[in-house]
Amino acid sequence: MHPLTIGFFLMLLLSVTEIPASTLQQNGHDNQPGKTVILVHGYAKGPKDMQPLAELLEKRGYQPVTVNLPLTFEHVQDAAEVFAKRVEAILSGLPDKEPVAMVGHSTGGLIIRYFLSHNPNHKRITHAVLIATPNQGNTLAGMLGDFSDWLVETFATLDSLQPENITKLDLSDPPGTKIGAIAGNKSTIVLGQLLRKENDGRVEVESVYYPGLDDFVVLSHNHNEIHHKNETAELIDVFLKSGSFPKR
């Protein structure tokens, strides 16, 4: 396959975009103390992509809140600034000391980690779950960067996901927040064939893990489905209640 074709193919598949429906959407009506969970979508997605998980968590008694972030043409740091404002608005509608949890899919997990590393409101966040998050960077984004600087400059979120750029986010986990990560290892997505190591079709399992996590688990799901599964919602529920995943 011609190199130009490969580069275009990578860019196209990585950038399948879903137009977000709203800037802030809350599911549920009654605020239950300690039950608010902020859901953060991934690259080139929007709140609609987190709706299945929101419904699964709502059935378990949580009050999920979804947000809309510019995670296609903006760097992670810029999207994180938007997220900080969204979180401030959410927290302002809750009792002052009510604890809040966060759950992010893919790049959404990096947004959460950036918030926990740089925002003083991190003290309100007791638990966070990162689903298929490229904590060590995304190999596919690195491939795209090697092929074309212009593409990663245009799709700036992918520039942030290049492995060599993850350290620029200056991520550190606050001691008061329990953080768990869920990786997938079902590589049924075409892009997964370009990755040599165990992966979910987009992100390698070893990239999801990083030292310092309170717990880590691997599920047999691909990148596009893992956050829509009842099994994932059950693991999130247990982690938010106990700070660890059930033994498998």
Image (cartoon, rainbow, N blue to C red):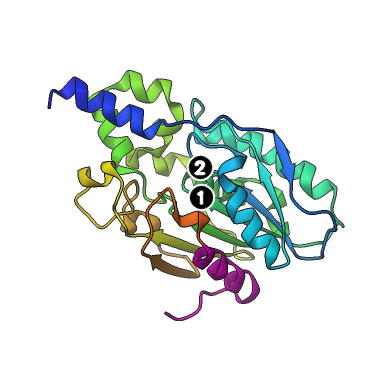
Does residue 209 appear in the picture of this structure?
A: no
The circle on residue 54 is none
Residue located farthest toward the left when viewing the structure as drawn: 1
Q: Which residues are magenta?
A: 230-248
Residue type at the position of mark 2: Gly
- Residue 51 higher or lower than 128, as above or below: above
> In the displayed structure, would residue 179 be above or below residue 138?
below
Position of residue 243 in the picture relative to residue 204 (left or right): right
State the image coordinates of residue 175 (x, y, percent, origin top left).
Answer: 60, 65
Question: Is residue 43 covered in magenta?
Answer: no
Within-10-Å neighbours for mark 2: few <14, some 14–19, many 20+: many
Q: Report the residue marked by disc 1.
A: 105
Counting from the top left corner in percent of width and height, residue 42 is at 50, 42
The residue where tag 2 is placed is: 42
Residue at 31% in and 53% down: 204
Determine the main secondary structure of the stretch shown in magenta. helix
Q: Quadrant of the C terminus?
A: bottom left
Which secondary structure lies at badge 1?
strand
Identify the element where label 2 is drawn. Answer: loop
- Asked if the residues shown at circle 2 and circle 1 are in contact, with their CB atoms under 8 angstroms apart, the answer is yes
Q: Please name the residue shown 35% across and 27% down the image.
A: 12
Does residue 243 belong to the magenta stretch?
A: yes
Out of 56 and 115, give the one closest to the viewer. 56
Q: Hey, what amino acid is under mark 1?
A: His
- What quarter of the picture does the N terminus occupy? top left
